[in-house]
Structures are given as C-alpha cells and as structure tokens.
Amino acid sequence: MSLLEIKHVSGGYGEVDIISGIDMHVDPQEIVTIAGTNGAGKSTLIKAAMGLLPRISGSIIFDGTDLLALPIEDRIRVGISYVPQVRNVFGALTVLENLQVVEHATNKQARIREMFDLFPALAGRRAAYAENLSGGERQQLAFARALMSSPRLVLLDEPSAALSPALTDQVFMEVKRLRTIDVAVLMVEQRARQALAFSDRGYILDSGRIVLADTGANLLANEEMSDVYIGRGQAPSGSHPSHHPA
Ligand SMILES: Nc1ncnc2c1ncn2[C@@H]1O[C@H](COP(=O)(O)OP(=O)(O)OP(=O)(O)O)[C@@H](O)[C@H]1O
C-alpha cells in the first residue's frame, strides 16, 4: 500500500478549480517531484496533499487514514509534515527555540538531540537567531522543524527557492538523506532537471492537471516533455534514482 494516495482531488481558493482530477501516490522512502510551468498549480497541489486548501474534493489517504476527515492539527500526528516555501522558520527565535516550539513532538528533548545529530551545522548555531542564519542553514532548520514530529512523509515546497547553486546542491543532499531515516518526500521544484535526477518518480503539472507521470529518469529522457516542462541544462553527474521505480 502507498504511504500517500491522492485520488480525484480537485480544489482551489475560491470557486475556480486551481487543481483538477489529481491522482498520485507516494510510497515509503520515495522521493517524488512535482514539476511544471509557472502558475500550473504546483504549490497548490502540495498544499492539497495535506488538505490545506479552502475548497477541496476527492480523497487523500495517508497510511490508511482519511486525511480530509481529520482536523488539520491532527494530520501532523499521523505522520505527514509540510515545509512551506517562505516563512518556514521563526526569525526572532533562536535555532533551539525554533525546535522547542514545535507542538507535535513527543520526547522533545531527545528529538532535538536527534535533529542536531542529523544537522550538525545547526547544533553549532543553536543560540543564533534564525533570521541571522544563511539560506542553507535556514532551510536545514525548516527541515528539522518538520522532522520534529517524526513524520514518514514531508511535503517540501521549493526547498531550493532563493538559494545559490552551491546551497541548492547542499539542500538537495539533505533531501536525499531523508529516505535513509525512513522519510518519504513529495516536493515541488523549479530546478526540476536537477531534482528529477535524484527523484524516484515525478509528475508534470500543466494548468492544474497531471499531464505525465513517470520515473525521474524517464521524464528526463523524454525530450519533448523535457523541453516544455523541465527546461534544458545538464543534470549533475553521478546522480540517479537509486530505487523504487514507478
Ligand atoms: N492563496 C491564494 N489565494 C488565491 N489564489 C491563489 C493563492 N495561491 C495561489 N493562487 C493562484 O493559484 C494559481 C496557481 O498558483 P500556484 O502557486 O499553485 O502555482 P505554481 O505552479 O506553484 O506557480 P509558481 O511556479 O509560479 O510558483 C495561480 O493562478 C495563483 O494566482
């Protein structure tokens, strides 16, 4: 059984559907990327995966639980977590405080220690205010906050947004590391070529609809689709999906 199963999901912010008839899934430890043109509804789709749209229909089953039937605050408890694209940390709090204020963590002290083991750069910056972190450190803190509740799936909205190419490489390394701690990833990425190169699978979104679903490798090899939706450019050498073909 898939970890996340989205069936016939449509919805938006008002009367107009921004996403329509979405069917997709994420299996345990998979990395799945949503790519597509600007304004296609990618961020909206990632919000929908957590049931966060003002208007939504269809079904979202996470680990056997009907997410839409749960109050929002209970969704995190079943093992799904969301990192928004912006304002994903509290700038006026220190690194340590950012972790301490996460509500749905059990055994918080132990979990914070685990987060500092996982992100050693944050351990060294625990007393720094988040607003003074580098872009890469801030993104690590956003990941750590999302991982505090011990999720099995994290939803990432453009983890590389506003980062330099070097910091993007670093953040993508962190994304790849998540599956080694039994965390699956569903993410939106503008740097789709680079992201699909290490993704098990990908979905291409156009005008709110999925127009193609395949392995990351096959999507990259599909020149026609690639030109339109993924853009040209070289994928980093040596990076390829390691398991879980579609
Ligand atoms: N909070 C909101 N309220 C109303 N409309 C919204 C909201 N967020 C997004 N939209 C609209 O939904 C549509 C899709 O936006 P969305 O951000 O999901 O697309 P995207 O594919 O992530 O775009 P981009 O690649 O530019 O980030 C756009 O027309 C946008 O104006």
Image (cartoon, rainbow, N blue to C red):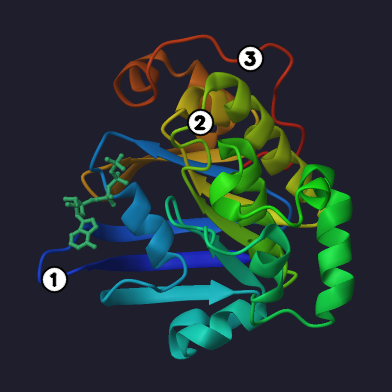
For the residues marked 1 and 3, what is the alpha-carbon distance in whole angstroms? 40 Å
| Residue 41 appears in the picture as rendered | yes
- For label 3, count other residues whose C-alpha is less than 10 Å away and answer few (under 14), some (14-19) or many (20+): few
Marks 2,1: beta carbons within 8 A: no
- The residue located at (41%, 14%) in the rendering is 223
Residue located 89% across and 52% down the image:
117
Occupied quadrant, residue 7? bottom left
Query: x%, y% of residue 24?
Result: 47, 56
Question: Percent position (x, y) of residue 123?
Answer: 82, 51
Residues at marks 2 and 1, CA–CA distance in whole angstroms: 32 Å
Q: Which residue is drawn at 46% across and 57% down?
A: 84
Q: How far apart are marks 2 and 3 (CA)?
A: 17 Å
Query: Which label was assigned to residue 163?
Result: 2
**Residue 197 visible, this orientation:** no
* First in residue order: circle 1 vs circle 3: 1
Q: Position of residue 17 (x, y in %)?
A: 17, 63
Give the residue displayed 59% in from the left and 64% down from the top.
93
Q: What residue type is labelled 3?
A: Pro
Q: Where is mark 1, residue-wise?
A: 14
